Image (spheres, coloured by chain):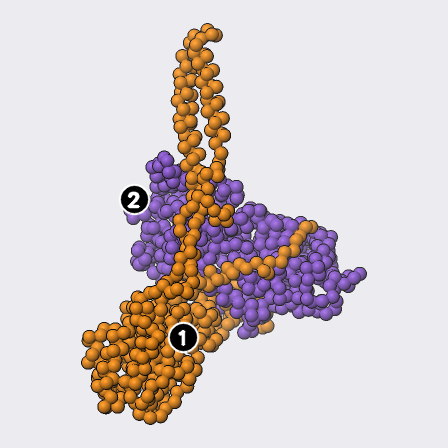
Chain colours: A orange, B purple
Amino acid sequence: MGYTILDQRHVARGKHHSNRERLLRRARAILDAQVRDQLKKQDITHIGSADSRRITIRGSSMHEPTFRHSGRGVFEGILPGNKQFNPGDKIPIDHGGGSGGKEGSLEGDEDGADLVLTEEEYDDILFDGCELPDLVKKRVAVMTNMERVRAGIAREGPYTKIHIPRSLGNAMVRRKAATIPREKKIKALAAEREALIQALDEQAPAGDPRRMRIAEIEEEIARLRKRINAVPFFDPLDLRFKRTSLEPKPVVNAVMFCLLDVSASIGDEEIEIAILFFLMLYRFLNRKYEHVEVRFLQHTTEAVEVTQTDFFKHRRTGGTVVSTAYDLMLRIVKEHYPLDEWNIYASQCSDGENALDDMELAMERIVDVLDVTQYVAYAEINKRPEIASALWKGMSAIAPEYPHLAMRHLRTKADIYPVFRELFTKGG
Amino acid sequence: MMLLYDSEEWTAERLQKATDAICRIYDKEIGIPYYPFQIRMITSDQMMDTYITHGLPFGYAHWSYGKRFAQLKREYDRGSIRLALELVINSDPCILYCIEENTTTANAMVIAHAGCGHNAFFANNYLFKQWTNPQGIVEYAAFAERYIAACEAEHGYNAVEKVLDAAHSLIPHGVHHYTHPKKFSLDDERKRLHKRLAEQERMHNVLMPQPMPPPEVSAPKKGTLDEPMENVLYFIEKNAPMLPTWKREIIRIVYVLAQYFYSQRLTKNINEGFATAVHYHVMGRLYEEKLITDASFERFLRLHTNIIMQPDFDVPDFRGINPYAVSFATFQDIKRMCTNPTEEDRKWFSGMVKRPWKDVWKDAVEMCRDDSFFLHHLSPQTIRDYRLFSIIGDFTHDHVLVTAIHRDDGYQDVRRTFAEQYEPNRLVPLIEVTGFDVLGDRTIEMRHREIGGRTLDEADVVQTLAHAETLWEFPAELKAINGAGDVTYHARVMNGSPSYYVKYRQ
């Protein structure tokens, strides 16, 4: 009998994407909780690794209830593999976890699903709701990409751009305009004819003017019908096309300055926390923003700008003079980032220590920094936050006048993700 | 004769040769007619997509399908070939899927199994003839996919998800068992839709706006039904007083598809047994005629053995009766009994043993579903081979009782019990709509007929009632009534919160 063979491997249907998308959306709360838990336990340097992206979705939101048996009650069943039983024998049921004896399988394990999230999906969850605050300044760069945008309807255009609903709508309107008055006329004429026919039945003469009138009416009706049928379903005048135009796409410019204290006062553990914090920040910026520049500044008694690779390899020598970092940042801003076009951000990690004689200058400089930035995040790595450090004291003093200065403590690695979220969440 | 294929790397040409031979053998030696079929070559990812929609090339999106996809992928990665065999749909032309990663032999097996076996079953079995429309189902599925996507665009994901979640919970109770509505016809659906769309066009008429037509369903007149209605979704769709059209349409889509698959649920065992028997016969013949190599046949045998594996009950691997196993054995035993009957066979199947086995196969395929198939064909030999025994009891207690084993005095009972496992009301609790509170708060009233003290899972009952309330838009209640007429359980959900009038006795 007949058959055909079709090769459909190239047909990209990807239906599972829409199903998966809906699953992830529904399981969002579960995923968030799992990711957060993971980050507490695992080494944060492994964020985004395949292992960390392995998720088990299980929970009440995954349950699909239905009217079903509870398992209580008398069931009859069949089992294969009788070795020694006779009718009347009793088989004990092991409720402690053996499989045996169950006639139908219950749902138990089936309410879960194991997935491996893609990196994008993982980052979406990680950074859900995070954003750079107050990203307001936009500028239209000369060398930006132009963007094609929809710009209404045109009466002419290529056939690929036909706006079908509009065109058909116009056609419908035109048809109705042409037919409805005629239909009305036909209706009136038909009524007249009916009346005449009624009147005529009572008398019979042939050359009666009413008969002629009836014939006229019928001719007229036929003519009108013909005109109605001749109204075309579609007319080129009905056509409408989608119009697009090229518009320059405004680009949001932002630059994030990462300031890291690498002096000797910072211990191994502290610097690791700082590095991880910046790693997370960097990943977030890369994932969410296309046009954010990141500048890496390290300082001890002097500040220097380093590459990304070097930034994450710390070096520790010397004392701490924080104002040098602020100085360097302000210099770079002046040279490269005109304030009317750039949104400036700064994130600083430090243990809070600073050379005593530098404090006054540092505070002056930080005010300068605050004056040019949209937002400054200060994360202090301090195991004993109840003893306020020099920088903390200084910043707390000026904080009331600068609401866009955010200060947090980081005690352990487990704090990194929650603090990061606090610092960079909408409304946070 | 020349080998059909000399390599396990399949090509369209090799598959074609194999299919020609398979069809030739099947037509000559088994001969039950089937629809023309389409073999679609797909990747394993596509397979899992298609598996979610039960083989239909179209289907709407839902999070539960995402969950199933993840579960399936895990099972497939563990090497379950069975998934591949089940990917065929009841349609005309019949569509079956071959997976890219499979060898030529495996694909040949799939073609014999699904292209001839399942196909013939769908084309001839009375349940499918009664309840399904193979000519229209693919188009209907495409319509369903588009319609629900349009609803999502217009009303938002969450609103649609709510309706689908609720409708899904009632799918086991969204089919007609007994009453016979008009057979689903795609033409009727089209006419109905056209009528609905014409109404909508009239509403949008820019020149002559008309007043809103009255809702399609007028307020239901009666509170109690003459006969209880076992299709809860159907009842809700037809009678919910204030449901908007789009929600009604979605419920309708869900139960139309449920009805289409209902026949498959009731014939899972016999269908798989038959298709397995077909592939076993055909592949065996291909080997006898030296059309496939020793190595290919051995590969086939390994796959086949894997599929019909039936672990004993006391083995950790045991997961219930394998639908491929005992039913395949039953079909094979029919063959044996009709060719070389023993005294015992003549005693048990006096009429059958005189007939050619392929006629008996054909009658079974046409006229049986799972329970009736086993009731009339399960042989003592097969019961002995699998050492089947029947048990009775409450599995939440500490023991169950053995009632019959593979002995002369036990075969009848074992067979009866085996068949009754697949009785439709065993698989799914019997729930019916008895009416609704027309004078009061319009609560929809449902009843569970409790048999053998088999109670319902309470947590699920409450959640499902909440879903019923979502669809019905008024409260929903359920009463469980046992054989003596006593109410053993009575709960009602209003605004999502349950009230309990009677709770199960512990």
Which residue of the protein is positioned furthest toward the right in this rendering?
B1
Mark seen at residue B439: 2
Q: Is residue B103 left or right of residue A328?
A: right
Q: Quadrant of residue A10?
A: bottom right
Q: Chain of mark 1?
A: A
Q: Relative to the observer, which residue lies in front, A178 or A304?
A: A304
B36 over B401 or under it: above or below: above
Image quadrant containing the C terminus of chain A: bottom left
- Residue for point 57% across, 64% down: B44
Q: Secondary structure at mark 2?
A: loop
Q: Chain of mark 2?
A: B
Are the residues tagged 2 and 1 within 8 Å (C-beta)? Answer: no
Q: Secondary structure at mark 1?
A: helix
Q: Relative to the observer, which residue lies in front, B12 or A223?
A: A223
- Residue for point 37% across, 83% down: A305
Mark seen at residue A283: 1
Q: Residues within 10 Å of mark 2 (few under 14, many from 20)?
A: few
Q: Residues within 10 Å of mark 1 (few under 14, many from 20)?
A: some
Q: Report x, y in % for residue A195.
A: 40, 16
